[in-house]
Image (spheres, rainbow, N blue to C red):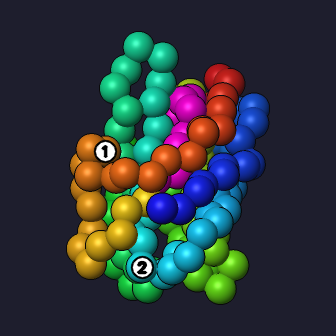
Amino acid sequence: QVQLVESGGGLVQAGGSLRLSCAASGRAFSTYVLGWCRQAPGKERELVAAIMRTGGTTYYADSVKGRFTISRDNAKNTVYLQMNSLKPEDTAVYYCAARQGTRLLYRVQDYDNWGQGTQVTVSS
């Protein structure tokens, strides 16, 4: 198991940027596939980005492609989500997720470790 703690959320104007961080405790961070998911009020949780163990392969939802960048630093046990050109529809609670494995995970239900979430609010 790995414990995940997100930070970096906040209020930003449309067009602005935020960088989310997720610090992990526990062993073998580099054996985990990582993802960032979000959940807006009244909507289902959705996966917005995922990254393989070494960071060489990534996935992005169409809604964030070209604006968000996921990265990881295995030496620091941390995964990041750089969010640029933010839109009001990006407003949600953002969650860090993880699962040990050897393939990229594309579904929310594939992840079995979750952080507590951090609120991102984009004003118009």
Give coordinates of residue 47: x percent, y percent: 36, 46
Give the side of residue 22 with respect to residue 32, left or right. Answer: right
Give coordinates of residue 123: x percent, y percent: 68, 24
Magenta region, residue range? 90-97
Give the side of residue 105 with respect to residue 118, left or right. Answer: left
Give the side of residue 52 with respect to residue 110, left or right. Answer: right
Count of numbered circles on the image: 2
Give coordinates of residue 93: x percent, y percent: 56, 32
Q: Which mark is residue 108?
A: 1
Identify which residue, 117 or 55, lies in the foreground: 117
What is the three-letter code of the residue carrying label 2?
A: Thr
**Residue 95 forms part of the magenta stretch:** yes
Instruction: Look at the picture and state if 69 lies above or below 63.
Output: below
Residue 21 falls in image quadrant: bottom right
Q: Residues within 10 Å of mark 1 (few under 14, many from 20)?
A: some
Answer yes or no: is residue 4 visible. yes
Residue 54 falls in image quadrant: bottom left
Q: Which residue is mark 2?
A: 31
Q: Main secondary structure of the magenta part?
A: strand
Q: Residues within 10 Å of mark 2 (few under 14, many from 20)?
A: some
The residue depicted at 54 percent of the width and 30 percent of the height is 92
**Residue 94 forms part of the magenta stretch:** yes
Residue at the top extreme? 42
What is the three-letter code of the residue carrying label 1?
A: Val
Q: Is label 2 in a helix, a strand or a loop?
A: helix
